[in-house]
Amino acid sequence: MSDGSTLSWILGGIFAVFVLMTAAGALLAALSRRLIRSVCGLALCSFGLAGLYYFLRSPFLAFMEILVYVGAVCVTIVFAIMLAEPEEYVVPWERRVGLWWSGLVLTISGILCASLAWLGLQQNWVAPATRASDGSVRAIGRSFLTTYSLAFELVSLVLLVAILGALVIARSGRTRR
């Protein structure tokens, strides 16, 4: 094997690890019975997404994914869980999902993913546009304060509401009896 093909195999393996990390974290977050395990799944999924963003040559977005979702959202949810009553850890399941239902959902999801992958490989993709900026911190900061200022403020507002909601949930967990 040549050095180029070995490198492509290694990069493909790392990409597959990030995809599996994202999928496993999403499944853990959605299917776990305990809330703390769901938060760990969310953190694992966020780390996988950060790796995928890094593969898309966007290290700033990868860093923000880790900083915002793992560093802020997951930690805030963990604090809310720690301040809540102990019996609130278990998520109640009134009705268990049958094995056939899970198999059906997995089969449909697999068919959908395979068909989308097949369609993606069959297309003639246009060449990417030239890079508009150099991707430096200065260029990103300038874009945040000019072109994307409204989106930046809306994301900040959503994070503020999430933090306030977590604090309200944490506070009501101690006083409720």
Image: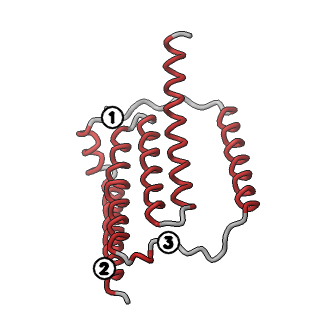
The reply, left or right, for residue 114 in relation to residue 74 is right
Badge 1 amino acid: Ser
Tell me whether the residue at label 3 lies in contact with that at label 1, contact meaning CB atoms closer than 8 angstroms. Answer: no
Q: Nearer the viewer, mark 2 or mark 3?
A: 3
Looking at the image, is 175 positioned above or below residue 157?
below
Looking at the image, is 56 positioned above or below residue 104?
above
Q: Residue at x 38, y 43 (%)?
A: 62
The reply, left or right, for residue 46 in relation to residue 124 is left
Residue 157 screen position, x and y as percent: 32, 66
- Closest to the observer, 113 or 14: 14
Question: Split into 4 quadrants, where in the image is the C terminus?
Answer: bottom left
Badge 2 amino acid: Arg
Give whichever of discs 2 and 1 has the lower sequence position: 1
Q: Which mark is residue 171?
A: 2
Q: Which residue lies most toward the bottom here?
A: 177
Question: Split into 4 quadrants, where in the image is the N terminus?
Answer: top right
- Closest to the observer, 142 or 18: 18
Q: From mark 2 to mark 1, how far is it between C-alphas?
A: 45 Å
Residue 11 screen position, x and y as percent: 49, 27
Tell me whether the residue at label 2 lies in contact with that at label 3, contact meaning CB atoms closer than 8 angstroms. Answer: no
Q: Which mark is residue 133?
A: 1
Residue 136 appears in which quarter of the rendering? top left
Q: Which residue is mark 3?
A: 90
